[in-house]
Amino acid sequence: MIAFTRAGYRMGGRIAESLREEGFQPQLAGMGRWTAGEGAKAPASLEEWTSQRFADSSLLVFVGACGIAVRAVAPWLKDKWRDPAVLAADEQGRYVIALLSGHGGGGNEAARRLAARLGAQAVITTATDGNGVFAVDEFARKNRLRLSDRKLAGEISAALLEGEPVGIGCEPAWRPQGELPGGLRWYEKGEKNLPVFGIWIGSAGETKGECQGKPWQRTLFLTPRSLCVGVGCRRGAQEEQVGAAVREVLSRLGADEEDVEGLYSVSQKAGEPGILAYCRRRRIPYRTFRPEELQAVPGHFAASELVLRTVGTDNVCERAAVKGSGMGLLLAGKTAVGPVTAAAAQRKRGIWF
């Protein structure tokens, strides 16, 4: 977050508190001598601040004019799937405006929730929101689903805006809960007069069932990012070696790194530089468990007496994957690539419309 006046910086403090209550970890900066009087931390320049925040933040909030925000972010824009969400809020707290990455980056939702906390008006201009139409990219982001074709996702939104029906189907384990949004129609086996467009929800490594034959002319696959990868390694393993092991175990499932929600290991590896570097680059969380926690995980694993004597648990990667997934299903067992071992388990979680 950044503000440019004394009043703006004070409003920024209110916004920061609201965002903190929404689960964010806001950091507020200020520019100009008026914000300095409020104790603000000032960046060297707005250009430098924006460049750094684009690289390390999921949400940017400019407390001030939209024009300042637009000019600041313009040089750093890549695309709607990689850019962070950007909001602008006036210093009186009357409006919260979603400027960038409204669906894919969660900007629209952040604007609505922040405005509700401030008693402000959220300003959202995306067509699906304005017309109360289901937005498949926002649905995917909220439920941590991977889109198979981003261009097709846009075409589906356009079809719904024009009143065309869109089919939807899923594997039984991933059936969304809640009321089916208007415009969507559940797929029925053998049905006639199928819509042109359809959405299929299914996990990596599992059959796509009836949708294998693509009953719709244009099928968008949504894959839950639910793979939890457990890793073990010799001390000093490099980031490239960690990545190679992760990719190898994922290849056994027909999955890739975009399907991974986190890496897990034993507590002795909490500070392992190669694993930490890999997770930073992929922007995924990394968590470790005590040896006794891993050893208590029920199931049949590739046990090693040497690992048990050295680490305190007979298997690191498989047990960590299952523990990290909330006792989910181990899909791919211990896979060794150089000094790194990896395994993958799937977390089961609900999907909501």
Image: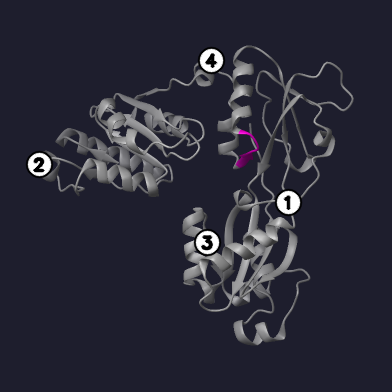
| Quadrant of the rendering where the N terminus is positioned | top left
Kind of element beneath mark 1: loop
The numbered disc on residue 35 is none
Q: What whole-number distance in Å separates the C-alpha atoms at marks 4 and 1? A: 38 Å
| Kind of residue at badge 2 | Arg
From the viewer's perspective, tell me whether residue 214 is left or right of residue 2.
right
* Colouring style: one colour
Q: Disc 1 or 2, which lies upstream in sequence?
A: 2
First in sequence, mark 2 or 4: give its number.
2
Which region shows up in magenta?
Answer: 145-149
Q: Position of residue 3 (x, y in %)?
A: 22, 37
Disc 4 crowd rating (10 Å Cα; few below 14, some 14-19, many 20+) is few
Residue named by callout 2: 33
Q: Answer whether residue 134 is visible to the viewer in this image.
A: no
Chain-order first, disc 4 or disc 1: 4
> Please, which residue is most extreme toward the top here?
162
Pick the residue in front: 53 or 114. 53
Sequence-first disc among 3 and 2: 2
The residue beneath circle 3 is 286
Q: Residues within 10 Å of mark 3 (few under 14, many from 20)?
A: some
Residue at x 72% of width, y 69% of height: 334
